[in-house]
Amino acid sequence: MAETMYEAPGIGLAATQVDVHKRVVVIDVSEDKSELRVFVNPELDNCLGLAVGEEGCLSVPGIYDKVERAERVTVRYLDLDGKARVLEADGLLAVCIQHEIDHLNGKVFVDHLSQLKQTRIRNKLAKQARVTA
Ligand SMILES: [Zn+2]
């Protein structure tokens, strides 16, 4: 999964995006790809504040839009050894965690946008599909 994410290139990937039906997320928000984090069964605990940032997604190529997220989150998860862990995150990491947990729940960031924007994005993606098909 980490390889797929780095190749994309992306800063996060949920197992559901590569057809793995487990609750696993990999994230690396560092610039030199040196901070790979793996979250098994991640659950958001405390969500505080509000931050609006531009997001894109490997599952919705070419689409970027502003999304409202919590500014700080606490996430409970298991590490690769099955050990329970708690992480407090803010900034880009907090956004990325929320984005990837959405994927595990079958949502993409587009679902956070207005109906009008969602329709526009669907039309755009349909056009792209016709060009590349
Ligand atoms: Zn995504």
Image (cartoon, rainbow, N blue to C red):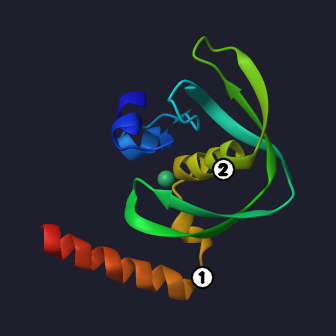
Position of residue 21 in the picture relative to residue 74 (left or right)? left
Furthest residue in direction left, as rendered: 133
- x 62%, y 47%: residue: 96
Q: Is residue 115 above or below residue 54?
A: below
Q: Residues within 10 Å of mark 1 (few under 14, many from 20)?
A: few
Quadrant of the image containing the C terminus = bottom left
Q: Residues within 10 Å of mark 2 (few under 14, many from 20)?
A: some
- x 36%, y 41%: residue: 18
Relative depth, front residue between 15 and 9 = 9
Amino acid at circle 1: Ser
Relative depth, front residue between 66 and 97 = 66
The residue carrying mark 1 is 114
- x 64%, y 67%: residue: 67
Q: Is residue 6 above or below residue 127?
A: above
Residue 56, percent from left and from top: 49, 60
Amino acid at circle 2: Gln
Residue 16 occupies quadrant? top left
Label for residue 98? 2
How far apart in space, not on screen, are marks 2 and 1 (Cα)?
A: 18 Å
Furthest residue in direction bottom, as rendered: 116
Residue 109 occupies quadrant? bottom right
Furthest residue in direction top, as rendered: 81
Quadrant of the image containing the N terminus = top left
Query: Tag 1, which secondary structure?
Result: loop
Residue 88, percent from left and from top: 81, 35
Label 2 CB-ligand 1 distance < 8 A: no
Count of number-bearing discs? 2
- x 58%, y 38%: residue: 29
Residue 45, percent from left and from top: 81, 42
Q: Earlier in the sequence, mark 2 or mark 1?
A: 2
Residue 83, percent from left and from top: 69, 14
